[in-house]
């Protein structure tokens, strides 16, 4: 398998449920880098809660954040590319105010949210930057939105489908996310592949969620985690182990790492 670059999702792929990188995953990534394979993170997270793990792995590659809405420089963290999403704000808030949910708005200048929850508290702890605003989002002064997250606690395609003419919709088991039309992890990957002069056929992508579908379908080698849904598994070329059982390392070790003997020869 001729792979020059691998794009790795974070939650449910690189990370365990404890939000930690296992020593086995770490070692597999180190060995890939030693083979001169470019290793990238491609996540739905915002930059501030991606960068600490990027640093822990010692990566020197740009970070794809917010489902492809932003790409950040490896050293400075500067946004190399950002794509904002334009919604009818009044309509969005009217629709989301009618149901019990939390709304998180990721902007170029920080996070705005309806209320705090465990996830946002974790983000604040890891990224060391609290939300810029908590409360009634109808009166919040935000701009340059990169991603909307609506957390309802259950699937709600009947609501998310109302935004398909304005945004790219990603449906989750606990709600949905909105980014600009045609924005995805894959759209960001294509931008980086042009910069690095790497063919899509020389790329592996690995993930577990609906926001990984495009990159799994279009990368030369798409890999679904064992904990992924059947829809995600169907889109992939390979299915590896569960993220709690180092499925990422399992795939890398089995298909990408050169054996000691082959390196010596």
Image (cartoon, grey):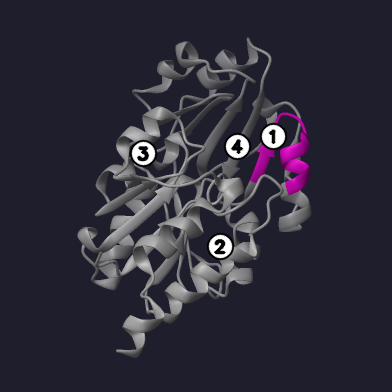
Numbered disc 3: secondary structure: helix
Label 1 close to label 4 by CB (< 8 Å):
yes
The Cα atoms of the two marked residues, 3 and 1, are separated by: 27 Å
Q: Is residue 67 left or right of residue 48?
A: left
Q: Which residues are magenta?
A: 111-122
The kind of secondary structure element at disc 4 is strand
Please give left or right for residue 100 compared with residue 87 in the image.
right
Label 4: which residue?
105
Residue 258 in percent (x, y) is at 36, 75
Task: Find the distance from the CA under tag 3 to the CA under tag 2.
Answer: 22 Å
Q: Residues within 10 Å of mark 1 (few under 14, many from 20)?
A: many
Tag 3 near tag 4, CB within 8 Å: no
The tag earlier along the polypeptide, 1 or 4, is: 4
Residue 256 image position (x, y, % from top left): 36, 66
The outermost residue toward the front is: 261
- The relative height of residue 236 versus residue 38 in the rendered view (above or below) is above
Indicate which disc residue 213 carries: 3
User: Along the polypeptide, which appears first: circle 4 or circle 2?
Assistant: 2
Q: Earlier in the sequence, mark 3 or mark 4?
A: 4
Residue to which mark 1 is pinned: 113
Real-space Cα distance between discs 3 and 4?
Answer: 23 Å
Answer left or right for 233 relative to 250. left
């Amino acid at each position: 398998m001729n792979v020059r670059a691998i794009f790795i999702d974070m939650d449910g792929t690189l990370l365990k449920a404890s939000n930690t990188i296992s020593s086995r995953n770490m070692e597999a990534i180190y060995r890939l880098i030693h083979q001169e394979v470019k290793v990238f993170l491609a996540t739905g997270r915002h930059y501030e809660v991606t960068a600490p793990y990027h640093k822990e792995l010692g990566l020197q590659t740009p970070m794809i954040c917010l489902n492809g809405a932003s790409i950040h420089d490896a050293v400075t963290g500067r946004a190399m590319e950002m794509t904002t999403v334009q919604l009818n704000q009044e309509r969005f808030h009217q629709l989301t105010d009618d149901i019990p949910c939390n709304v998180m708005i990721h902007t170029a200048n920080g996070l705005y949210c309806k209320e705090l929850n465990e996830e946002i508290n974790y983000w604040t702890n890891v990224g060391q930057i609290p939300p810029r605003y908590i409360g009634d989002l109808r009166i919040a002064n935000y701009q340059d939105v990169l991603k909307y997250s609506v957390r309802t606690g259950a699937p709600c395609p009947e609501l998310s489908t109302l935004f398909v003419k304005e945004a790219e919709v990603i449906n989750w088991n606990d709600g949905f996310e909105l980014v600009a039309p045609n924005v995805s992890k894959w759209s960001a990957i294509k931008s980086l592949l042009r910069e690095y002069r790497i063919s899509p056929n020389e790329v592996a992508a690995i993930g577990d969620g609906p926001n990984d579908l495009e990159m799994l379908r279009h990368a030369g080698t798409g890999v679904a985690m064992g904990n992924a849904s059947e829809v995600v598994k169907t889109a992939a070329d390979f299915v590896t182990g569960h993220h709690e059982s180092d499925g990422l390392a399992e795939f890398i070790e089995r298909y990408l790492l050169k054996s000691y003997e082959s390196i010596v020869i």
